[in-house]
Image (cartoon, helix red, strand yellow):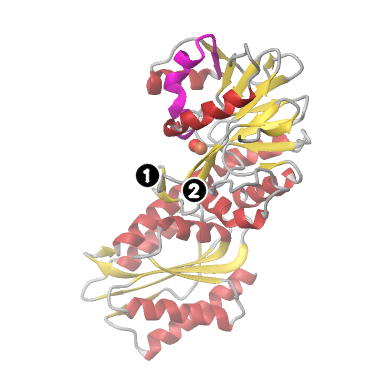
Amino acid sequence: MKEPVALSENIYWVGVNDYETQLFEGLWPMPRGISYNSYLIVDDKVALIDAVKQFFLPDLMEKIGQILPAGKSIDYLIINHMEPDHTGSLKLFPQLFPQMTIVGNKKTAGFLESYYGLTEPVTVVEEGDVLDLGRHKLTFYITPMIHWPETMMTHETTSNILFTGDAFGGFGALEGGIFDDQIRADYFEYETLRYFANVIGKFSPMVQKAISRLKDMDIGTIAAAHGPVWRRNPGHIIGQYDRWSSHQTEPGAVVVYGSMYGNTQRMAETVARGLAAAGVQDIRLHPASTSHLSYILADAWRFKGLVLASCTYDSRLFPPLRLLVDFLSPKGVSQNRVLGILGSYGWAGGAVKEMQDFASQGDWNVVEPVVQVKGGPTRDTLEQCFELGKNLAAAIKA
Ligand code: FEO
């Protein structure tokens, strides 16, 4: 017998844990799984807030069945976000709950049709609309692009719980504890940053907009669609998302290198030595060939300093570095960051030029010297790398 998890009187967590999916969105590793949080409100009318991924429908149904009083069914499915990690199970809902109405905004309705061919019964809500369930009332706030155009948040005003969809979520399954006062928040800290950097970071301006609105609401509980429910200290997770989305960085550096035979690696390590010699303690060295992009992005989002070191491959950046700069550009990571560039080539350059072009497209503060060597590094080259590390350290501390 599973115990119902209550957020407050008649509001329950009915989410599931996914340890099966290896890559979120087919891209991002989840060694510690992820939760798809769904919430049930039982009142005169019954509302389910967000659903779960397709394969977890039986688990969701079992949890709902343990809570629903005899004779009751789901009257409303509130969709804060249409991405299939929350709606994949939706296809069967019309058969399971024939009298149920789906509630979303105008854009939700478009996605319902394009993804699932569903056009009715759908109720379209707008900013500030209220849905009366009896004792509980739901107010809707349209918060687009956290993470898709239709994303919105639902505020349950009786218990002061804000259901936020992807916003304030993170990777990591809920391993027993559901609430922030039942877990060690620091266990989730890095996985939440990684989720933000991989999935949400590109939409930082929209996160900032939502957070500025929350400041006037004094929310009691943040119930996101992934990760823990924040009831003891909702300000903690809001603060973390605020820091990351406003590009407040930590005084450390991530050094990413692409190297075939160790020459560029040696240069990158010498930059790291320069950083350390000048007092930077948080340094993360990533070989681009073997460190997953997901972890590099998380560190790039966290620290003020970024060093890109690349050998030249087919007259261009080393391929894993190409992928990294492709992801860094649209995610807007350049703000409040300092960048070091270095590279090597055999007979014709290419890598350093490509990194400089990348830097010129953002707000990157490029720290001198840019170091480039033909063949392997000489004593002179390594001295320049060390110098670059020291200069980066000064820029990080500035
Ligand atoms: Fe949790 Fe954007 O999906």
Q: To which residue does mark 1 refer?
A: 26
Query: What type is the residue that disc 2 sits on?
Result: Gly
- Find residue 70 and report its image quarter: top right
Residue 106, image x and y in percent?
52, 18
Q: Amino acid at mark 1?
A: Gly
Dot 1 surroundings within 10 Å: few (below 14), some, or many (20 or more)?
A: few
Provide residue 188's location: percent of width, then percent of height: 60, 53
Give the farthest residue toward the front: 1
What's the residue at 78%, 24% (across, down)?
Answer: 158
Which residue is under mark 2?
Answer: 33
Q: What secondary structure is the magenta-colored segment mainly?
A: helix
42 or 373: nearer the eye? 42
Whole-percent x, y for residue 234 in the image: 73, 43
Q: From this viewpoint, is residue 237 visible? A: yes
Element at label 1? loop
Residue at x 46% of width, y 46% of height: 19
- Name the side, left or right, on which 264 lies relative to 105: left
Q: Quadrant of the C terminus?
A: bottom right
Mark 2, residues whose alpha carbon is within 10 Å: few (<14), some, or many (≥20)? many
In the structure shown, which secondary structural element does the residue marked by tag 2 occupy? Answer: loop
User: Which mark's residue is nearer the viewer, 1 or 2?
Assistant: 2
In the image, what residue occupies the spot 38% across and 84% down? Answer: 381
Tell me where the magenta segment starts and ends, as one range. Answer: 85-104
Q: Which image quarter: residue 278?
A: bottom right
Q: Is residue 29 above or below residue 217?
A: below
Res. 141 visible in picture: no
Give the Cα separation between the discs numbered 1 and 2.
14 Å
| Residue 92 highlighted magenta (yes or no) | yes
| Residue at screen point 64% across, 71% down | 397
**Is 329 displayed left or right of 6 in the figure?**
left
Is residue 258 shown above or below 123?
below
Foreground residue among 350 and 273? 273
